[in-house]
Image (tube, rainbow, N blue to C red):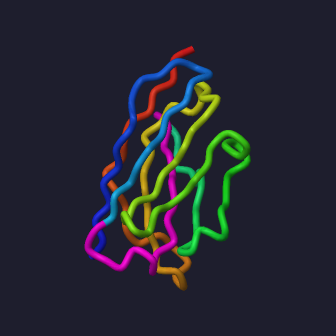
Amino acid sequence: QVQLVESGGGLVQAGTSLRLSCAASGGTFMRYTMGWFRQAPGREREFAAAIDWSADKTYYSDSVKGRFTISRDNAKNTVYLQMNSLKPEDTAVYYCAAKRNYVATYEYWGQGTQVTVSS
């Protein structure tokens, strides 16, 4: 069983940056593809970014591409989401997720961290 704990959320002004962290425990970190999802009030949870086990491949939604960067440190069992040029529409609860590399759907989820961007 993998446990995921997010941190780094907060209230920031538009145009600034924030870095989220997600610490994983309970599994072999390198066996997992890691992702970040977000859910804004009144909306469904949506994919933001993902990174494969080796960090060779990254994926982004169109809404965050060019502004957000996902990375991972396998030695620290941690995945990061660097968010730059934040916009009010980035306001959401951000969730870290993990799935085994050969599985289609995400299997483990964190509790989420709130990001609020003021205009």
* Location of residue 51 with respect to 62 vertically, above or below: below
Residue 35 belongs to the span the image colors magenta? yes
Q: Residue furthest top?
A: 119
> How many callouts does the rendering have?
0
Q: Is residue 72 left or right of residue 111?
A: right
Q: Quadrant of the N terminus?
A: bottom left
Residue 70 position within the rendered picture, expressed as x and y whole percent measured from the top left: 57, 54
At a point 57% along the width and 33% down the height, the residue shown is 90
Residue at (40, 74) in percent of width and height: 29
Q: Position of residue 56 (x, y in %)?
A: 65, 70
* Left or right of 7, for residue 14: right
Give the x, y percent position of residue 102: 54, 85
Residue at the image position 52 percent from the left and 18 percent from the top: 13
Residue 117, horizontal then vertical, whole percent: 51, 24
- Quarter of the rendering containing residue 76: bottom left
Q: Which residues lie in the magenta part?
A: 25-41
Tell me: 6 left or right of 71: left
**Image quadrant where residue 25 sits:** bottom left
Work out whether residue 100 or residue 56 is closer to the camera in this orientation and state it. 56
Q: Is residue 77 above or below residue 16?
A: below
* On-image quarter of the C terminus: top right
User: What residue is drawn where x is 46% and y is 63%?
Assistant: 73
Vertical comparison of 74 with 59: above or below: below
Judge whether residue 107 is colored magenta: no
> Looking at this rendering, what residue extends furthest in the bottom direction?
102
Give the side of residue 20 with respect to residue 23, left or right: right
